[in-house]
Amino acid sequence: MLNYTLRRLMFSIPVLLFISFIIFLILDLAPSDPTGNLPLTIPPEVREKIRESLGLGQPMPVRYYKWCVQFFVNEPLNIWDQYWGTCSFGCEDRLRVVSYVTRSPVVDLIVQRMPQTLWVVGMSYVVGILIAIPIGVISAYKQYSWFDQTGTFVSMVGFSVPPFFSGVLVIIIFSVQLGWFPSIYDTTLKVVSWDTFMLQVRQMVMPVMVLALQTTAQISRFMRASMLDNLNQDYVRTARAKGMKESVVLLVHVLRNSLIPVITVIALGIPAVFGGAIITEQVFKVNGIGQLLIIGIQGGDAPLVQTLTFIFAVMIVMANLVADIMYGILDPRIRYD
Amino acid sequence: MPDGASQVLDVRDLNTVFRTRNGEVHAVNHVSFSLKKGELLGVVGESGSGKSVTMMSLIGLLPSPPAEVRQGQVLFDGRDLLQTDADTLRDIRGARIGFVFQDPMTSLNPVFTVGFQLREPLKRHMGMSKRAANKRAVELLELVGIPDAAQRLKDYPHQFSGGMRQRVMIAIALACDPEVLIADEPTTALDVTIQAQILELVKELRQKLGMAIIWITHDLGVIAGIADRVLVMYGGQVVEQAPVREVFKNPQHPYTKALLETIPHVRGERAERLQVIEGQPPMLGDAPTACPFRTRCPQAFERCARENPARATISPGHDVACFLAGSESADA
Ligand SMILES: Nc1ncnc2c1ncn2[C@@H]1O[C@H](COP(=O)(O)OP(=O)(O)O)[C@@H](O)[C@H]1O
Ligand SMILES: [Mg+2]
């Protein structure tokens, strides 16, 4: 298992390098101009100077090489030093990837934005899964009952209603009409007491609800299908013939088997949820990395967009790895050596 | 009944129906039989004749819906299992009545170790601690002839061969020393040599433990060597019941005779061509009002389409559901 994991990790290095090259190439080919957002009074010669100062005059391979060095060597070292407060390998004159628009290091921007995204998106994914699995189990066990029918209907709604619609809908209902929750996510809020904690919870409720609806809709369907598959298996009859209680049959024998494919879906869904959060973050004004990406795209901020896109790529590759490893842990028939 | 006390299981007039989208399926019709202490009862019949459904009905293993046990009594230990609540039935299943199913490849849970699956009934029914259950599990695996038992408890089902898995299934069924073991085609999915080994094992275990066994098969040849008594089923009914020697020497029902023809005689200089029973088993859409075998029976006459023959005793312990039983034409 460990061997397999290490091998997969090694293999993901060339994959990620290749992806980084593609991302770099695509952004390089895009006809966007980092000076496009600057005031029109700036004369063209100055604009050219600005472009040169951003390093855009150099040939593409050189720029790619520099970006790689920056991204794979310097920035990780920077993060390391910042985190431990140390200074290794000449930290004074180490370069940083700097955003064209804000002139601040890209990594710092992302580090600032990450917690909001993780809280809202991560929480909604966890909440969604925790709701989805019991729903899937009960729907399958009581197939075609009113519970199952309701579940089917709600999932259909969750599947078909996009978050930019459901988001606005819950804002109208819960913020505007009922006034229960704030419609704007306040990032400056610091949780220091019970009251601020409750404020934090209240402002998280709606975005989490909207994102969790999507997750729940998908995962509960997968869970239901997987449970139904397994409920008809011979080993279930064996467990009953042994006189095991229904709860044991269902929650030990069937559940463990049913989770195997669902875990894969859950792991592979992580990057997609982050992607989907881009829209939800806009709707609720959560200034997470999704919103940062949109600002970056609008400003022609290639370093920022490159970095964020690459982070998404890393997440996808890692999610695949996690899915495979979980699969191996849950299913003893899978052995990776 | 003189020997009522020596009966462990007494099934009377059992009827099981499946309600499906295309109407009802009368899978078991008026089935009655009894099982004596320590006896091995063979149940034969081609597939679809209702053998499995009968046995699963006894102990509440059929999913309901679609299954519905409409009528009958199953007397076990002074109570009617069909009237027993689900909790008590669960206490009986696996503890006093053990099951072995046909396909050892799918009957064990693939994601739990064999030890886990073997300890489960021990903990559940005997209240054993994990350690005690483990000790007993090792004994059980040794009992069914699995070498290196203590080590193998930690293995998963896929690490065992088919025959070994069926041994594990037998060990699970025998875990709590049941009075009755129901084996539903336990060797059908296995190679012939493995099949012989399992048969040998069951004979030996029966000697050692003395439980009563119901052995279901579609192959009369398998039954010949081990059964005391044979129940022949067709179309969800018992068509003939007799001591094993009677079945081979003096079969009465045309279906039993036809089944005997299908046994390959490999001991002869050359194997004869296999006989097959022409025609299809009946559809069981309605409760039977005629003999279910009449469409394939070479001796059918008009009464067979009007009435469903009842089981009639022709000699002690031998009864047949055929109008021709005991008469000249049946012996012809
Ligand atoms: N779940 C079910 N739904 C409908 N019919 C069924 C179901 N299970 C079994 N049957 C029917 O019951 C009859 C007896 O089946 P079974 O007892 O499995 O036969 P066998 O003698 O091969 O064990 C068959 O005709 C089959 O079609
Ligand atoms: Mg069967």
Image (tube, rainbow, N blue to C red):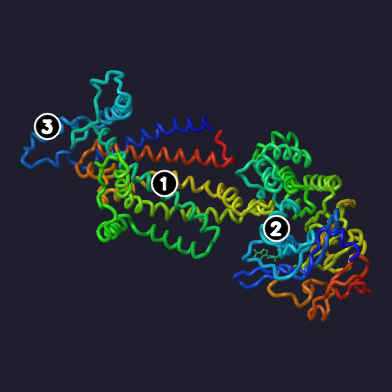
Q: Which callout, 3 or 1, points at the residue further toward the start of the chain?
A: 3
Q: Please identify the quadrant where the N terminus of chain B is shown.
A: bottom right
The residue lying at 32 percent from left, 52 percent from top is: A206
Nearer the camera: disc 3 or disc 1: 1
Is disc 1 in contact with disc 2, using a CB cutoff of under 8 Å? Answer: no
Label 3 crowd (10 A; few <14 / some 14-19 / many >=20): few
Disc number placed over residue B53 in the picture, else none: none
Q: Chain of mark 3?
A: A
Is disc 3 in contact with disc 1, using a CB cutoff of under 8 Å? Answer: no
Q: Which residue is mark 3?
A: A49
Q: Please identify the quadrant where the C terminus of chain B is shown.
A: bottom right
Residue A4 percent across, percent down from the top left: 51, 32
Residue A220 percent across, percent down from the top left: 46, 54
Specify the amino acid type for callout 3: Lys
Question: Where does ligand 2 appear, by image quarter?
Answer: bottom right
* Residue A292, quarter of picture: top left
Q: Is residue B94 above or below residue A288?
A: below
Q: Is residue A139 above or below residue A258?
A: below
Q: How far separated are the C-alphas under marks 3 and 1? A: 49 Å
* Residue A267, quarter of picture: top left
Q: Is residue B171 above or below residue B243?
A: above
Residue B109 percent across, percent down from the top left: 63, 47
Is disc 3 in contact with disc 2, using a CB cutoff of under 8 Å? Answer: no
Same chain, labels 3 and 1? yes
Disc number placed over residue A126 in the picture, else none: 1
Same chain, labels 3 and 2? no
Q: Nearer the viewer, residue B264 or A331?
A: A331
Label 2 crowd (10 A; few <14 / some 14-19 / many >=20): many
Q: Nearer the viewer, residue A251 or B125?
A: B125
Q: Which residue is mark 2?
A: B89
Q: How far separated are the C-alphas under marks 1 and 2? A: 40 Å
